[in-house]
Structure formats: structure tokens, C-alpha cells
Amino acid sequence: MKPPFPSLTPTWHNDTYPVIDPTDPSNTQAGKTVIITGAGSGIGRETAIAFAQAGAKHIVLVGRTEATLQETQKLLPTTRGCISTVCAASVGDVEQMKKVVDPAGSWDIFVLNAGHIAAPTSIAEASIEDWWASYETNIKSILITAQLFLPTANSNGATMLAVTAGGIVLPPSSVPGLSAYMTSKTAQVKLIEWLAAENPNLFACSVHPGVIDTKMLRDSGLSGLPYDTEQLPAHFMVWLAHPEKTRFLNGKFVWVNWDVEELGEKKDEIAKSDVTQINAMGWPYLHL
């Protein structure tokens, strides 16, 4: 379909397609250990299923509610030998996340999917506790993850994918009342860029998952948008977690709607530029 937003590729996807199919041999994750936060529902659950379909060896399901994680666990296909571990923990709590390190062991792929969206309101009228909870979950959790889990990452190379929000590119007037969510997600993209720069053996990328019919989206107050399927971000991330072919996106902010083959055709241009990275718009202002 024609892209409804500015796009790096002429082709825009709302659903999965053959090139990112997790069962395609080119997208195999055989032998890999994958940790997924926010795995009890929605995008996190579908991403866990996709990595299992791709042949992951071990999937670690992290979330606050053990019952929903167990529901996800029951949905994981085991025909390719995948085992799974449930770890009930809040991603913003250091002590709880410490208890995930040993069960996970050495890991290859970490999907930072857990997120928090404060109730839509103006900054002046916001609950400070609810507003700041967006930073606790969307930013502090990445700091915790980096400090606890980078030491146990596969020394031959690991992947860290952070689920962010496409709305960060929009002016406040387009997403009223969402200052906590949008500013924390903007900071998240920059933090992932720093992680990529500081860790040569880590492939790190921020991922806008599309417009998915999740509780978080409904809580945001946004409505009337065309939905994408949950399989699209899940399958896109399976494809993305192959640094040998996606290295040009290291430290970048990508949309799952973009066509991956068309992205690949622009890989040299993308890798050498600051396209899709967070900056002061127009800098260094040479056009003024």
C-alpha cells in the first residue's frame, strides 16, 4: 500500500510477508537464547512465538504477571526443540531483574518490549507518579538491562532490540496529552544509539512496531488509526536479529512497515548517514 507516513521505502506493509517469515531458513534463529520483556501479551507474546518458530533454543519470558507469561509459554511451538523459562519480574526493579540473569544464562537476543504509558493529560495536570513511571519502565529498565545483562551476552556478538513509538516524530499537537510516553520513548531511541556506539559486539536497534490493537494503544486515547497485525513486528524483529545482514541499521530507529528488501538496497546510504537518528532538526543548519 502507499505509505500513510513518510517512509524510507516505497512499499509499506501492514502484515507479515514471505521475506520476514520466521519459518524461512534465511531467518533461522537456531541455537539462540532470546530474552523478551513484556512477554505476557500482545507484541511480546507474538514475538516469543515467532522466535520459537524460527528455531530458537531457549526463550526467556519476562513480565510482571506469572499467569500471563505461562499462557504465552503454552502457545510456543516446541516442534523445533525450543525450551522456555518464565521469569516474573518488573523490568524497572533492579533486584527483581537480578533474579532473571542466572535462569537466562548466556544470551544472543534481548527484546526490550515492556513499556508504560501514562494516562493522557497535560504536563501541568499530570500525576507525577504516573508520569514518571513512563521513565522508570521505558528508560530506567534499559539502564538496568545493560548493566545486568551485557556481561552475559554472547561474546561473539549479541542483539538488543527496543520497541519504541513512531509517534515521537510527530509534533505535540498531533499526540496531545502523551508527553511522558513520547519524551521517554525519544530518550529511549537515543539511549539505544549510545549502547550501539559503546559496545562493538552489540547490534542495537530501536523498532517502531506499527499500530497494533493493544491495551497500551487504547489507553493512549489514540483511535481511528488503521491497525497492523501483531505478526508484522514479531516477524520483522526475527529478521532484524541477524546482524550479519542488518548491521547497517545498528543504532538506528526503524519502522516495521518498511520493506526490508528495499531497505537493503539503501544500506550504504543509511549506514553512512544520520538518517532515522535523534538529533536537533536541521542541524548543522547549513541550509540557513
Image (cartoon, rainbow, N blue to C red):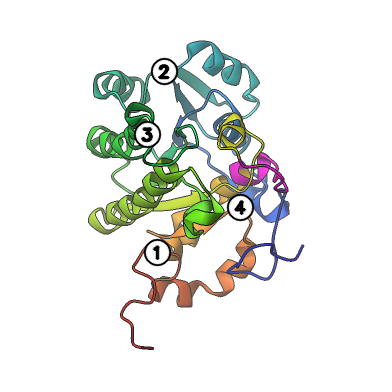
Amino acid type at image mark 4:
Ser
Of marks 2 and 1, the one in the foreground: 1
Gap between marks 3 and 1, in whole Å?
25 Å
Q: Nearer the viewer, residue 173 or 203?
A: 173
Residue 55 can be seen, yes or no: no
Residue 30 appears at what percent x and percent y? Answer: 53, 39
Confirm or deny contact between disc 1 and disc 4 (CB under 8 A): no
**Which amino acid does the dot numbered 2 rest on?**
Cys
Residue in the image at 39% along x and 52% along y: 186
Mark closest to the chain's N terminus, 2 or 1:
2
User: Label 2 belongs to which residue?
Assistant: 87
Magenta stretch bounds: 222-234
Q: The residue under label 3 is which amino acid type? A: Trp
The CA distance from mark 3 to mark 4 is 42 Å
The amino acid type, in three-letter code, at marker 1 is Gln
Query: Callout 4: helix, strand or loop?
Result: helix
User: Which residue does the image show at 22% across and 36% down from the upper left?
Assistant: 147
**Left-right relation of 48 to 224:** left
**Label 4 crowd (10 A; few <14 / some 14-19 / many >=20):** few
Q: Residue 286 occupies which quadrant of the picture?
A: bottom left
> Label 4 belongs to which residue?
26
Q: Quadrant of the C terminus?
A: bottom left
Say which label, 1 or 4, has the lower sequence index.
4
Q: Position of residue 160 (x, y in %)?
A: 39, 45
Magenta stretch holds residue 226: yes
Can you identify the residue that label 3 sits on?
A: 131
Residue at left 63%, top 63%?
5
Which of the 4 image quadrants contains residue 51? top right
In front of the other: label 3 or label 4?
Answer: 3
Labels 3 and 4: the sequence-earlier one: 4
**Mark 1: few/some/many CA within 10 Å (<14, 14-19, 20+):** some
